[in-house]
Amino acid sequence: MKKTDLDGLITETRNQATMNVDALSIAETIKLICQEDQNVVEAVQAETNQMVKAVELIVRSLEKQGRVFYMGSGTSGRLGILDAAELLPTFGVGEDVFKAMIAGGEIAMFHPVEKAEDDYAAGVNDLLAENPQAGDVLVGISASGRTPYVMGALAKGRELGMHTIGLSCNSQTPMREVADVVIAPVVGPEVIAGSTRMKAGTAQKLVLNILSTVSMIRLGKVYQNLMVDMQPTNEKLQYRAERIVMEATGADLKVSQETLEKAQGNIKASIVMLKAGCDFPTAMQLLLDGEGFVRQAIKLAENL
């Protein structure tokens, strides 16, 4: 990316409302940052139609056993890793389904590897190393909308027949030439010019949370507003699993614990067992017939 490519990017321009931020008190500075952050939610919400299209692509792919890849550099890459890492404990979805990559590799998660974002070929190679297939989904994350590492991955992804989604905080960018869907919450100039870890980063995190969460809901990993496919891998999560069963069924703690034990820790099956008054094998069959949706499995049980 040439220096001139940054000209005109709103994420790189100076914010006229914060020109004297260095002369403000601590309280005034915090108030000003909060005021600027209020623009972020509106900017993300304005991209609802594009996010709908992106979720539809993700769900369609995952229903066919496809995979989703997040790729970005710097803050954008770290946000992708953060979102993907939380999907296993929250929804039982691991790296075999959602895989996040950052320019510069693992070390870049904790230390800046600034020149890595300029490596177009590295984006291509990092993607190819994961053996992506046609029909998989690639989400390229770049505040500027033109990071070479991300652009290389998106271009190669489209060539391979992947569904490509671009996430940027600038409107008209080269991403539109290589992405099937572009989500572009325009949050305006940063409080500190060019510091896209601020409003742009917040917007990207919101979008990624929305894409993954709504996709998981559409795949049956949520019942009511409870995370019924979470993995109780530690004491805190075990207690959360018990609370989920209690909340969903009205059963007391003892019954919920006993049912979870009978269901081999399967929260979905535990809920169906208690709501439908059935045993574990029957609950599993109901869930299979209901395509993994707890609500549908309970409804099917009513017709037995």
Image: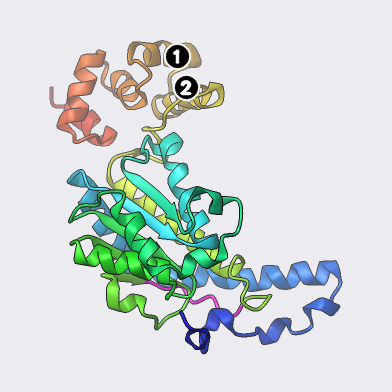
**Residue 124 shown in magenta:** no
From the top left corner, tell me how far across and down residue 17 is, in percent: 70, 84
Badge 1 crowding class, 10 Å Cα cut-off, few under 14, some 14 to 19, many 20 or more, is: many
Q: Name the image quarter holding the C terminus.
A: top left
Q: Residue 213 in the image: state x and y as whole percent.
A: 39, 49
Give the CA distance from mark 1 to mark 2. Answer: 6 Å
Closer to the camera, 150 or 67? 150
Contact, mark 1 vs mark 2 (Cβ under 8 Å)? yes
At 62% across and 76% down in the image, what residue appears? Answer: 190
| Residue type at numbered disc 1 | Gln
Q: Residue at x 63, y 71 (%)?
A: 195
Name the residue carrying label 2. 242
Depth order, front residue of 169/100: 100
- The percent coordinates of residue 274 (x first, y second) are 33, 19
Residue 276 sits above or below residue 201 on the image: above
Which picture quadrant has residue 97? top left
Residue 202 in the image, given as x and y percentages of width and height: 56, 63
Residue at the location (85% across, 79% down)? 23
**Is residue 161 depicted above or below 174 in this figure?**
above
Residue position for label 1: 257
Residues in magenta, as a range: 183-189
Q: Nearer the viewer, residue 42 or 191?
A: 191
Most prominent secondary structure in the magenta stretch?
A: loop
What type is the residue that disc 2 sits on? Answer: Glu
Per the image, label 1 sits on a secondary structure element best described as helix
Q: Is residue 49 visible to us here?
A: no
Left of 154 or right of it: where is 209?
Answer: right
Crowding at dot 2, Cα within 10 Å, few <14 / some 14-19 / many 20+, comes out as many
